[in-house]
Amino acid sequence: MIQGDVMVSMENGRVCVKKFGRDAGRLCVIASVIDENFAKILCAGRKKKRRCNIRHLEPMPQTMELKGSDEEVLKSLAAMEGEMKA
């Protein structure tokens, strides 16, 4: 996917903004890529991983380490979301 002049790939740990659906406008991180159309994501404000169409995600240049638990990843996503709004 091309963002500006930079090619951004959909990979594990890529931070994205959800474009459509109930979580539209929220930050999320790709936990795993299922195939070329779908990925499992963790979205800020939710506790479980969800399946999402990759076309519904706007990739950002940031990536995240997914080493800790889902709760730790969600806390850091919430902090990133707070920084963006401030």
Image: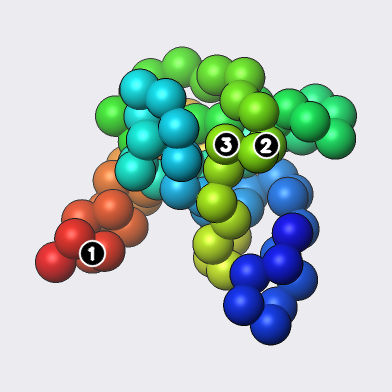
Q: Residue at x 28, y 46 (%)?
A: 78
Q: Kindly identify the amino acid type of the residue bearing the numbered disc 2.
A: Ile
Left or right of 81 on screen, residue 10:
right
Q: Are marks 3 and 2 in contact (CB under 8 Å)?
A: yes
Residue located farthest toward the left when viewing the structure as drawn: 86
Q: Residue at x 65, y 38 (%)?
A: 55
Residue assigned mark 3: 56
CA gap between label 3 and label 2 equals 5 Å
Left or right of 75 on screen, residue 83:
left
Q: Residues within 10 Å of mark 2 (few under 14, many from 20)?
A: many
Q: Kindly identify the amino acid type of the residue bearing the numbered disc 3.
A: His
The reply to whether residue 73 is visible in this rendering is: no
Residue assigned mark 2: 54
Residue assigned mark 1: 83
- Residue sitting nearer the eye, 20 or 11: 20
- Disc with the residue nearer the chain's start (2 vs 1): 2
Residue 2: name its quadrant.
Answer: bottom right
Position above or below: 25 against 35: below
Q: Residue at x 58, y 55 (%)?
A: 59
